[in-house]
Each structure stands twice: as C-alpha cells, then as structure tokens.
C-alpha cells in the first residue's frame, strides 16, 4: 500500500504544528498580573576595605536584608606592589557582604586596598540607602 503526501498536506501539517507551538509558547509566558519589582544598578569605584588575612566585609547594611539583590566586586588599587587585589570573591549574605581578597598568586592580602563593586538594589528607600552607604564609603576613601 502506497501513501503519497502532496505538498499541500505537508504544508497544512507544518502550519498546524506551528500554530500549536505558538499556543504553547503563549501559555508559558508569565501573566500580565505578575509583578516584577523595579531595581536600580549602582557602581561604586574605589571602596576602601581592610582585609585581615584576606577576609573583609563591606560593612553594616551591605546584605540582602537591606535591599541588595546582587553584588560583584573586583580589585581597584593598589596597582603595584605586594597588595594588588587580583582576586576578589564576593558573598552576599543577609547581614553583610563578605569578601575574600587575594593577590594574583593566591596569597591572602592584609592591609587596606580598594575595590570596585556593581550592585543591583531594590528601587525602594531601603535599597537606595544601601547604595548610598557604599557611595559614601567610596568618596570617604
């Protein structure tokens, strides 16, 4: 028994499959009633920190309980000598943002260095205050 498909039947089958895929894609999208809280991005340059054996924090009010959604830091200065912050590990916790600052060769740094941080905060007074604290720390250093 031979069954030959015409190009019209193949085109109709493809169109039906495309329509079904479109319906599935529309159903997978979040509904119009889904609320996304607004956020703001802040960049702080030259924030002074003083690690002891490579361990430091960004100070009180720098945790996720204070409106910070995400943070990433990298070394800024000094750019020469034995305290170049070549590796900065950032850990956002509810209470504080903890840093582990190492030289490029993996040795822990002790002494004041500066870091650059990018953080995403909730667009609320709490998030704005957290960003302002880091901005003030950068300008004070």
Image (cartoon, rainbow, N blue to C red):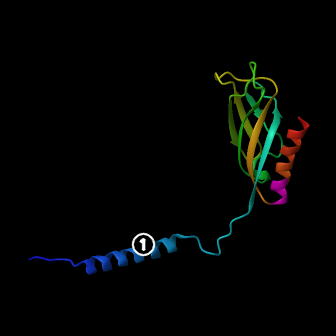
Looking at the image, how many numbered discs can be counted on the residues? 1
**Image position of 62 with respect to 23: above or below:** above
Looking at the image, the residue that sits furthest to the left is: 1
| Position in image of residue 67 (x %, y %) | 78, 54
Where is residue 120 drawn, in percent x and y? 73, 52
Q: Which residues are magenta?
A: 124-128
The vertical placement of 42 against 137, above or below, is below
**Quadrant containing the N terminus in the rendered view:** bottom left
Observer-nearest residue: 53 or 47?
47
Q: Is residue 139 magenta?
A: no
Q: Residue furthest top?
A: 82
On the image, the x and y values in percent for residue 114 come to 80, 32
Magenta residues: mostly which secondary structure? helix
Q: Residue at x 64, y 23 (%)?
A: 106
Residue 125 lies within the magenta run: yes
- Using the rendered view, name the quadrant where residue 138 is placed: top right
Q: Which residue is mark 1?
A: 21
Report helix, strand or loop for mark 1.
helix
Q: Is residue 6 left or right of residue 122?
A: left
**Residue 20 drawn at (x, y percent):** 41, 76
């Amino acid at each position: 028994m031979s069954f030959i498909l015409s190009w019209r039947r193949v085109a109709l089958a493809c169109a039906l499959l495309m329509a079904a895929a479109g319906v599935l894609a529309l159903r997978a999208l979040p509904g119009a009633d889904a609320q996304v809280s607004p956020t703001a991005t802040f960049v702080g340059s030259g924030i002074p920190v003083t690690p002891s054996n490579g361990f430091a924090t960004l100070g009180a009010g720098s945790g996720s309980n204070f409106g910070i959604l995400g943070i990433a830091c990298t070394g800024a200065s000094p750019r020469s000598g034995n305290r170049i912050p070549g590796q900065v590990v950032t850990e956002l916790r509810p209470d504080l943002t903890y840093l582990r600052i190492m030289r490029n060769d993996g040795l822990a740094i002790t002494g004041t260095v500066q870091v650059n941080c990018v953080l995403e905060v909730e667009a609320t007074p709490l998030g704005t205050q957290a960003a302002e604290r880091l901005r003030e720390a950068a300008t004070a250093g």
